[in-house]
Amino acid sequence: MKQFQLGALVVLLGASSSLPLFMVGCGSSSSGIAAPAQAADPQSAMKQPLAAYNAEGELIRPADHREWVFVGAPVTPNDMNDGKAAFPEFHNVYIDPVSFASYKQTGLFPDGTVILKELVSVGGKQMDSGNGYFQGEFISLEAMVKDRQRFSDEPGGWAFFRFGEAPNYNPTGARMKTESCNTCHAGASEDYVFTDTYPVLRAAKAEVQR
């Protein structure tokens, strides 16, 4: 197997493999999925992003996504939207650490960026600390991936995937229809990402502007 490294992008080419693996950095994979190369820094090997696809163009689910950079958890509950909220659950949003580091340096989301959204139900509304909205159970897992070459026909080069229902997420994410996602994301504050709702991303971009 030959390994070529171009900046943060690692491309693995194997003569016996029919599946192209394009990875920003490297990380571990789920059972039955080809393992990527090891990161140069062993301490960060388990925290590298994985953007790989099977022959059908489905996104292989990244391992350990809850150890990625957590950027926020917006919620639009039913009882604040006349009982008809479009997205009544929490959206726990993570970005792969390599792309986050690049964003802090450039203020731009690089090709290879993987942003994961894990939906969580609204649990109880009362705690010892007071009343509020508290997270319940995991519901599903979705992803948006930026790759202007692979997804050249998509707005901004972003494609959307869904890994099914919790707790047993699918090993690969099926491609979602662009219109079902981009209807909202077209109105995002920056590059189809709602950075204005995530203080972690706002603070990272502020580092670039200093």
Image (tube, helix red, strand yellow):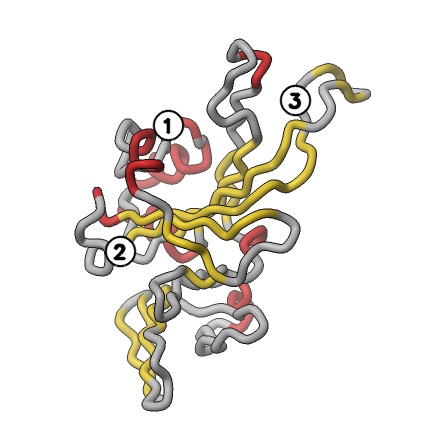
- The amino acid type of the residue labelled 1 equals Asp
Q: Position of residue 117 (x, y in %)?
A: 49, 42
Say if residue 104 shows up in the picture.
Answer: no
Q: Mark 1 sits on what residue?
A: 196
Reply above or below: 29 against 179. below
- Residue name at image x 33 percent, y 83 percent: 3
> Closer to the observer: label 1 or label 3?
3
Q: CA distance from mark 2 to mark 3?
A: 35 Å
Say if residue 43 shows up in the picture.
Answer: yes
Question: Looking at the image, which is closer to me, 163 or 42?
Answer: 163
Query: Which type of secondary structure does the marked residue at label 3 adopt?
Result: loop
Q: Position of residue 73 (x, y in %)?
A: 54, 33
In which quadrant is the C terminus drawn? top left
Q: How packed is label 2: few (under 14 Cα within 10 Å), some, or many (20 or more)?
A: some
Q: Which mark is residue 18?
A: none
Decide: marks 1, 2 in contact (CB < 8 A)? no
Q: Mark 3 sits on what residue?
A: 133
Question: Looking at the image, which is closer to me, 168 or 46?
Answer: 168
Q: CA distance from mark 1 to mark 3?
A: 21 Å
